[in-house]
């Protein structure tokens, strides 16, 4: 579907590493860049942060005029009709100097317009007629991390990430070749990601590292309430 399985919240990131060449030994083979994200961890002090971001269409401005965009061979971006993002971090010790916890909860909602074919007008005019529809996107995520220190040279960390995404119209199907009557809805797209790390520094010459990861995704794409079984899903004749 050319769609990321989940969107990581930047509020849970401690460090981001991007390598183009010379991957480390524990990196999975990749034909492009290798990206390593280190998540935040709890500490011996209790901490909490709250963030909120909001903007709408009236708060956006295109810096280039239509003539300048046309001269450069570009089209004018549609932007977002509305964007709201809420995030909460809480971290601290469960047992000082031995066991720490970090957690994050996020709710993201945005609305954007997408161009697509109007099937009824296309049939009557025998050429592709385009229209726009607003597509609301809702996303809820929860992240938790536990870090254990059994000994100065023996550490274990485990994380769990849950994300749930919903769209009335699956926006990646709402293109210049599909009408909204043929587009599926994205209902309760859930992603469960579990990871665990074990590190043991036996001595200065021996370092043992083990990593376990599990990803489960439930991605139902059902017909939306606007779906019509009589309308074709692709309109090759108009390409």
Image: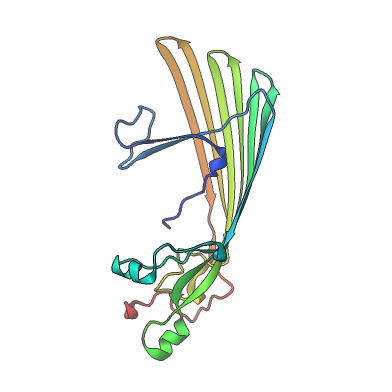
**In this view of the protein, can residue 138 be seen by the observer?**
no
Quadrant location of residue 33?
top left
**Residue 186 falls left or right of residue 178:** right
Quadrant where the N terminus sits is: bottom left
Residue at the (33%, 80%) spot, across then down: 238
Find residue 236 and report its horizontal and vertical position in percent.
34, 77
**Closest to the observer, 222 or 91:** 91
Query: Residue at 56% across / 13% down in the picture?
Result: 152
Residue 171, percent from left and from top: 49, 65
Name above or below for residue 1 compared with residue 132: above
Q: Residue at x 30, y 30 (%)?
A: 22
Note whether 58 is above or below 34 in the view shown.
below
The residue positioned 35% from the left and 67% from the top of the image is: 69
| Total residue callouts | 0
Camera sees residue 209: yes
Q: Quadrant of residue 226?
A: bottom right
Tell me residue 25's x, y (percent). 35, 27
Most foreground residue, 163 or 8: 8
């Amino acid at each position: 579907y050319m769609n990321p399985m989940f969107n990581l919240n930047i509020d849970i990131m401690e460090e981001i590493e991007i390598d183009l060449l010379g991957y480390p030994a524990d990196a999975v083979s990749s034909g492009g860049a290798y990206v390593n994200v280190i998540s935040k961890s709890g500490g011996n002090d209790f901490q909490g942060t709250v963030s909120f971001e909001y903007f709408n269409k009236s708060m956006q401005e295109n810096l280039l005029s239509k003539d300048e965009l046309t001269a450069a061979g570009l089209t004018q971006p549609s932007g977002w009709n509305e964007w709201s993002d809420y995030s909460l971090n809480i971290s601290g010790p469960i047992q000082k100097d031995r066991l720490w916890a970090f957690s994050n909860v996020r709710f993201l909602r945005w609305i954007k317009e997408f161009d697509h074919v109007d099937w009824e007008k296309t049939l009557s005019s025998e050429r592709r007629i385009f229209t726009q529809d607003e597509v609301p996107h809702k996303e809820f995520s929860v992240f938790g991390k536990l870090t254990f220190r059994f000994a100065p040279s023996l550490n274990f960390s485990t994380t769990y990430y849950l994300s749930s995404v919903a769209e009335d119209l699956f926006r990646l199907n709402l293109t210049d070749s599909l009408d909204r009557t043929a587009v599926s809805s994205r209902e309760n797209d859930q992603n469960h990601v579990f990871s665990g790390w074990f590190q043991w520094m036996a001595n200065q010459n021996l370092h043992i590292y083990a990593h376990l990861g599990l990803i489960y995704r439930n991605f139902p794409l059902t017909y939306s309430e606007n779906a019509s079984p009589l309308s074709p899903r692709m309109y090759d004749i108009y390409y």
